[in-house]
Amino acid sequence: MIKDRFGRPIKSLRISVTRRCNLNCIYCHKEGTLPTNYEMSKEEIYRICKVAKEFDINKVKITGGEPLIRKDIVEIISALNSLNFKDISMTTNGVYLKNYAYKLKKAGLDRINVSLDSLKNHIYKSITGKDFLDKVKEGISKAIEAGLHPVKINMLILKDINENEVWDLFEFCKEHGAILQIIELVKIDDNSDYFEKYYKSLDSIEEEIRKKAEKVMERKFMHGRKKYFIDGSEIEIVRPMDNSVFCANCTRLRITPDAKIKPCLLRNDNLVDLKPALKCKSNYMLKKLFIEAIHRRSPYFGKYKYVV
């Protein structure tokens, strides 16, 4: 398995297949990608993933924008499934999931993350700009029914908005057999006004969870995340902010919708453009560019910040 200069193995690929979305969330950072009119084709996504597989990258996560907006999303999953990845997953807002859950499972999707920050209609609408909460709940039920396990519910904590709904979401997940993933808001750039307005540290929330937990585990090769087990269900904590442990355990490369390798979520100054290589029939240049992107990786938080 290939490693970067800091000894971190590259195990997974996170592919943003579109910047388009059917929601307008107040905190959206679009995976840290820059505006673009270019959107990779199914064939380009397949070629990129084929090269990734040759580097022993064995997991792929499909994201957006909202990936279910793409009319060829099932075909994309089917194409990736033919490459025999160990795990193919997706992050979605769940609005269209009711119609796609069974098709995605049949195509080869293993599991799914659904963004759901509130169970209250007025709060959900204030966050997303749309009144789609019932559709999302239906989508979650269909995903569980279709066997997309585990279904994880991504709850981003927003100060003075949903911070008091953690246990409501936990009970919802427990009832449906899903896992609650609590996420700390991340600041993508210095002009992120939303961050100052909505950021809340997870310290007090995690301490409350810790006191109730019967068991705690750390996912060493998943950014050192902690999983708390309570009443037969799970809560996972995702804390990227100023977290050197998060960076030290990062094993992921990202692909932007316009076919650039993004070595770090929080940077746009070290991207590697794959488009010229995708015009060639051979994958030789794609492989060279993958190696270059891996070489450009450095921990954003910690003593090695911005080492080039």
Image (tube, rainbow, N blue to C red):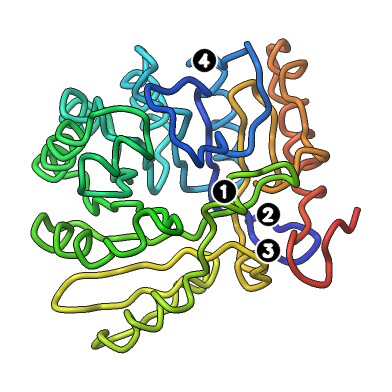
Q: Earlier in the sequence, mark 4 or mark 1?
A: 4
Identify the amino acid type marked 1. Asp
Badge 1, how many Cα within 10 Å: few under 14, some, many 20+?
some
Amino acid at the residue labelled 4: Glu
Badge 4 is on which residue?
A: 43
Q: Earlier in the sequence, mark 2 or mark 1?
A: 2
Q: Amino acid at mark 3?
A: Arg
Residue type indicated by callout 2: Ile
Q: Nearer the viewer, mark 1 or mark 3?
A: 3
Q: Which residue is mark 3?
A: 8
Residue drawn at (72%, 24%) of the image: 274
- The residue labelled by disc 1 is 56
- Closer to us: 131 or 3: 131
Q: Are marks 2 and 3 in contact (CB under 8 Å)?
A: no
Query: Residue beneath label 2, please?
Result: 2
Q: Are marks 2 and 1 in contact (CB under 8 Å)?
A: yes
Q: Nearer the viewer, residue 222 or 84?
A: 222
CA gap, disc 3 and disc 4: 29 Å
